[in-house]
Amino acid sequence: MKNFYLAIETSCDETCAAVIDSDGKILSNSVFSQANIHSQFGGVLPDVASKNHSEKIMIIIENSLKSSNIKINNINKIFVTNGPGLINCLMIGVITAKTIGYVNKIPVYPINHIEGHIASCFIENEITFPSVCLIVSGGHTNLYFISNLKNFKLIGSTIDDAAGEAFDKGAKILGLGYPGGVLIDKLSTEGDVNYHKFPIANLGKKSLNFSFSGLKTSLKYYINKKNNWKKNINSIAASYQEAIVDSLLNKLILADNIYNPKSILIAGGVACNSRLRFKTNEYFKNKKNVIIPSIQYCTDNAAMIAKRGQQLVLNENVTNVDLNVFSTSKN
């Protein structure tokens, strides 16, 4: 007999709910994106994000239940992101999950947002272990060595900005708006990646860590020196994006050389980037199994939280004791 699980994700500016069955099949995945709302501010405002979560979360949950044709009294477990993320946004999801759980006598379990991103790679694919996984988003740029579904070892991370932050800050410098990664990716398709060589941080030959703050500064200095730079904005964007992508790919290649995994995984919002997807697949073609989720599972969503919860249930490794909210920008 199948069980059904509801998942809730509100760690940043997407309000998300999903339903998954105990076999791991995603039955619904509902998302309300606030990108257009925050674009006028040039980035995510936590107070505005939490307000919109409060207004939309029950609508999104009801929509997800309706789309899956599952009623709340058929839900056996509720999974909810409890961090890392924006604390006032996380609180909306956790309080809602606990309230629904209390009223309907359904146990509620906390899920780590980063583990959710890793789990997104498993939604549509069979993964061969061991694997190296790059989580790359607006708040996170981490490398993990994954030996099985329980053991995720952090082997590298950014020492300053995340790659997504580098895209957003670069887009702001270029006057493009928010979200920066999407806009730079779009411009870059008509630009020359070799137009200008932006620097890639050198943290040592054996280091698996990342750094992007110097790249952002380099772009700013370059723009300040060029009066007519807007005429070449496509190529500037392409060159800037190339530096970010090469920085990520270089560390993936180094991790591959060190750990010799059977699979290379990339997840998180920046995994939507067309250049990163192309160059990674090209480099590892006929060498390693490369898994990058479809676009709907790269950006924040509840399907990945549902999948991680289902994985933990299979491994009898879930607990609903002391469900609190935690927030950290680096995890």
Image (cartoon, helix red, strand yellow):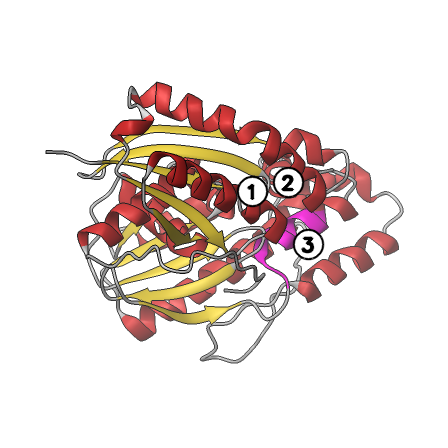
Q: Is residue 35 visible?
A: yes
Q: In the image as oriented, which residue stretches furthest toward the right?
A: 227
Tags 3 and 2 touching, CB below 8 Å: no
Q: Position of residue 77 (x, y in %)?
A: 29, 41
Choose the circle earlier in sequence order: 3 or 2: 2
Taking depth in this image into account, of 212 and 153 the one nearest to the observer is 153
Left or right: 127 in relation to 269: left
In this rendering, position of residue 45 left or right of residue 224: left
The amino acid beneath tag 1 is Ile
Query: Which of the 4 image quadrants contains residue 21?
Result: top left
Point 53% across, 58% down: residue = 140
Alpha carbon distance from label 3 to label 2: 40 Å
* Residue 326 picture location, percent across and down: 53, 60
Q: Secondary structure at mark 2?
A: helix
Callout 2, which amino acid? Ser
The residue at the point 39 percent across, 25 percent down is: 64
Q: Which residue is mark 2?
A: 50
| Mark 3 to mark 1 CA distance (whole Å) | 44 Å
Write down the region rendered in magenta: 161-170
- Give the class, few, some or many, for how many residues have Cα within 10 Å of label 2's Cα (few <14, many ≥20): many
Q: Which residue is at the front of the view, 274 or 118?
A: 118
Q: Which residue is at a point 20% across and 57% down the rendered structure image?
A: 316
**Residue annotated with mark 3:** 196
**Mark 3 or mark 1, whichever is nearer to me:** 1
